[in-house]
Image (cartoon, rainbow, N blue to C red):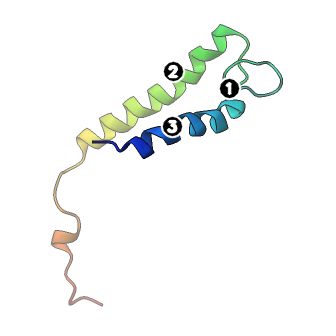
C-alpha cells in the first residue's frame, strides 16, 4: 500500500508538471488548439504500436542467449 507521505507528493508533482502541458501560449494541453490535431497525435503512435506488436508476434520466442556458444571467440 502507498504511504501517506508518498500520496502527499502527488499534488506537488502535478503542480510542477502542469505548466509544461500548456505550451506556446495557447493554454491548451500540448499546445493543441484544434481538436483535429489530436487525430494524428493518436493515430501515428497507435499505428506504430500495432506494427510493432505484429512484428513481435511473428518472432520466435527462443532464448537468444541460450544458443550462444561462449567457447567461440
Query: Where 63 falls versus 10 (above or below)?
Result: below
Q: Which label lies toward us, 1 or 2?
A: 1
Q: Viewer-proximal residue, 26 or 39?
A: 26
Q: Viewer-proximal residue, 39 or 17?
A: 17
Q: Viewer-proximal residue, 32 or 25?
A: 25
Q: Quadrant of residue 2?
A: top left
Give the residue furthest to the front.
4
Judge the density around disc 1: few (<14), some (14-19), many (≥20) Cα neighbours within 10 Å: some
Residue highlighted by disc 1 = 30
Q: Is residue 36 left or right of residue 44?
A: right
Q: Decide: marks 2, 3 in contact (CB < 8 A)? A: no
Judge the density around disc 3: few (<14), some (14-19), many (≥20) Cα neighbours within 10 Å: few
Secondary structure under the numbered disc 1 in the rendered image? loop
Q: Residue at x 76, y 28 (%)?
A: 23
Residue 10's disc number? 3
- What is the distance, in whole Å, between disc 3 and disc 1 at their CAs? 21 Å
Q: Viewer-proximal residue, 16 or 48?
A: 16
- What is the distance, in whole Å, between disc 1 and disc 2 at their CAs? 16 Å
Provide residue 45's location: percent of width, then percent of height. Answer: 50, 30
Secondary structure under the numbered disc 3 in the rendered image? helix
Residue highlighted by disc 2 = 43
Provide residue 25's location: percent of width, then percent of height. Answer: 83, 23
Q: Which label lies toward us, 3 or 1?
A: 3
Q: Earlier in the sequence, mark 2 or mark 3?
A: 3
Provide residue 21's location: percent of width, then percent of height. Answer: 67, 29
Q: Is residue 57 left or right of residue 11?
A: left
Residue 44's disc number? none
Q: Earlier in the sequence, mark 1 or mark 2?
A: 1
Q: Residue at x 72, y 25 (%)?
A: 22
Provide residue 42's location: percent of width, then percent of height. Answer: 52, 21
Q: Earlier in the sequence, mark 3 or mark 1?
A: 3
Amino acid at each position: 500500500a502507498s504511504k501517506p507521505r508518498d500520496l502527499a507528493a502527488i499534488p506537488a508533482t502535478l503542480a510542477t508538471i502542469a505548466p509544461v502541458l500548456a505550451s506556446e501560449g495557447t493554454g491548451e494541453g500540448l499546445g493543441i488548439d484544434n481538436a483535429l490535431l489530436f487525430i494524428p497525435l493518436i493515430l501515428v503512435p497507435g499505428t506504430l504500436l500495432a506494427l510493432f506488436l505484429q512484428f513481435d508476434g511473428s518472432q520466435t520466442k527462443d532464448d537468444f542467449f541460450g544458443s550462444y556458444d561462449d567457447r567461440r571467440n
